[in-house]
């Protein structure tokens, strides 16, 4: 775990190294994924089936490609009532939040008499990737499927790996709750390729969303353009800005809430109190010993964790902006004052009683967020990722005469005479 202090002479250089640390896929992953995509595109179903035997240890011809929606319904009804209520609460709140994201069409006539506007419409089909290997996340299924439903997407095709042919019943239950009836028992880069190009019974989609491992993220990156994607997601990250008014156990738990995701997760604390930072570090060590995920969380914390002591909490904001973290917690008495200064973060959690984990499940905002400093230019998953905007315009003879001469002049200046002529002939100009 890295310790930095703003008064140390090497602070700037060491913080630069923290910002520039690379925790994402290697050239080897990119090469392997390219080969998988190429094979799925050329061979289709046989390639997907072969990779499934190799990586997930089951034969699709035996276990079946598709998961029956009746199995999803049965899984939901078999849930403990408390867990069923939690899933339903999450779904309801996610839906309510995303309903407010639906964009409005525009249609107006300007002073020149030109009718202009834009119409929003959903994509025809969306592919949802749901992890199912080392960990299964029904919450991610809801976070991806519900915005697509709110957008009005008619066909949702879900893919999820089923190691040894087994699938987490919570994932099935969440699929039932989200109304997904097309579920394929495949995962990895080969599943992403199948969604993009089609393979056997899996028909192509228009957009692919959802988190996955390095191979899944790289497959989405390489297939962007064939299909739309939500983002290229890397390892999870959290920045906590906290003062000594916090309970160090709370802060330690917040840092570990992300560290347990993966060995390459990044958890960083900014504080203006060095003693508080030391106490948080001690509590992290103490809590690690109690976690079932200790091995992963400890590796992540020791390799990528950091405690940064700054002069004031305001000094932490530009440093956090350079990291552009996926998650930013402002665990202070007046979070709004700091929040007003924040420029780059995937999602911000305001105050001492707003742990990031609430956002992962039931708060409502989407937990599929930009990582790897991409919050500088990207946003979390939303309804808009499943929609496209079509602009339109309509002129009459009067408005064409108003705008036509300028169009002709510009087209001729650009050396495009056919462009100019298509307007000029309507205006009966000699061109």
Image (spheres, helix red, strand yellow):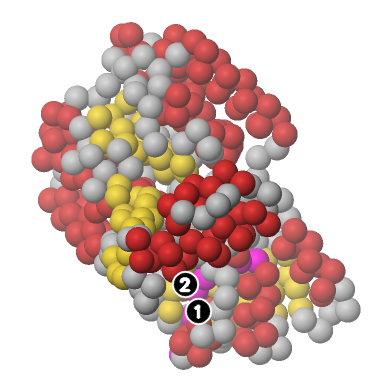
Q: Quadrant of residue 244?
A: bottom right
With 155 as the anchor, is 46 left or right in this view? right
Q: Residue at x 57, y 70 (%)?
A: 344
- Looking at the image, which is closer to me, 241 or 192? 192
- Looking at the image, which is closer to me, 327 or 245? 327
Circles 2, 1 touching at the beta carbon (< 8 Å): yes
- Above or below for 430 versus 71: below
Numbered mark located on residue 330 in the image: 1
Question: Mark 2, mark 1: which one is toward the viewer?
Answer: 2
- Looking at the image, which is closer to me, 46 or 384? 384
For mark 1, give the secondary structure: strand
Q: Residue at x 34, y 23 (%)?
A: 203
Q: Position of residue 330 (x, y in %)?
A: 50, 79
Q: Position of residue 271 (x, y in %)?
A: 62, 81
Numbered mark located on residue 348 in the image: 2
With 30 as the anchor, is 333 left or right in this view? left
Q: Position of residue 140 (x, y in %)?
A: 36, 48
Q: Position of residue 132 (x, y in %)?
A: 40, 35
Tell me the magenta residue range: 323-333
- Above or below for 153 versus 391: above
With 384 as the anchor, is 151 left or right in this view? left
CA separation in Å, label 2 and label 1: 7 Å
First in sequence: mark 2 vs mark 1: 1
With 409 as the anchor, is 292 left or right in this view? left
Q: Residue at x 74, y 62 (%)?
A: 18
Give neighbour class at mark 2: few <14, some 14-19, many 20+ (Cα, 10 Å).
Answer: many
């Amino acid at each position: 775990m890295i310790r930095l202090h703003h008064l140390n002479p090497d602070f700037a250089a060491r913080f630069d190294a923290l910002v520039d640390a690379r925790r994402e896929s290697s050239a080897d992953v990119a090469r392997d994924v390219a080969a998988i995509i190429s094979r799925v595109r050329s061979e289709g179903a046989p390639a997907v089936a072969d990779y499934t035997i190799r990586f997930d240890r089951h034969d699709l011809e035996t276990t079946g490609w598709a998961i029956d929606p009746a199995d999803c319904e049965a899984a939901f009804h078999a849930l403990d009532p408390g867990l069923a209520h939690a899933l339903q609460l999450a779904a309801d709140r996610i839906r309510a939040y995303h309903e407010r994201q639906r964009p409005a069409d525009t249609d107006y006539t300007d002073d020149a008499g030109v009718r202009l506007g834009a119409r929003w419409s959903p994509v025809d089909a969306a592919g949802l990737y749901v992890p199912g290997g080392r960990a299964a996340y029904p919450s991610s299924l809801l976070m991806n499927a519900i915005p697509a439903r709110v957008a009005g997407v008619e066909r949702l095709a879900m893919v999820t790996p089923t190691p040894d042919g087994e699938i987490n019943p919570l994932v099935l239950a969440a699929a039932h709750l989200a109304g997904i009836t097309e579920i394929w028992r495949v995962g990895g880069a080969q599943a992403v390729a199948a969604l993009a190009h089609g393979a056997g019974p899996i028909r192509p989609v228009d957009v692919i969303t959802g988190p996955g491992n390095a191979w899944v993220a790289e497959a989405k990156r390489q297939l962007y353009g064939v299909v739309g994607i939500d983002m290229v997601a890397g390892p999870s990250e959290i920045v906590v800005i906290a003062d000594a008014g916090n309970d160090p156990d709370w802060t330690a738990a917040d840092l570990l809430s992300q560290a347990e995701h993966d060995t390459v997760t990044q958890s960083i604390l900014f504080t203006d109190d060095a003693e508080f930072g030391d106490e948080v570090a001690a509590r992290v060590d103490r809590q690690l010993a109690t976690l079932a995920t200790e091995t992963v969380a400890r590796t992540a914390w020791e390799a990528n964790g950091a405690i940064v002591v700054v002069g004031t909490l305001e000094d932490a904001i530009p440093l956090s902006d350079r990291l552009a973290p996926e998650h930013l917690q402002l665990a202070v008495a007046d979070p709004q004052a700091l929040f007003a200064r924040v420029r780059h973060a995937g999602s911000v959690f305001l105050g001492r009683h707003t742990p990031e984990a609430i956002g992962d499940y039931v708060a409502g905002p989407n937990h599929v967020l930009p990582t790897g400093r991409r919050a500088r230019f990207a946003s979390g998953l939303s309804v808009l990722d499943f929609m496209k905007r079509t602009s339109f315009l309509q002129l009459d003879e009067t408005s064409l005469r108003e705008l036509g001469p300028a169009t002709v002049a510009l087209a001729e200046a650009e050396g495009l005479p056919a462009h100019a002529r298509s307007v000029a002939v309507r205006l009966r100009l000699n061109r």
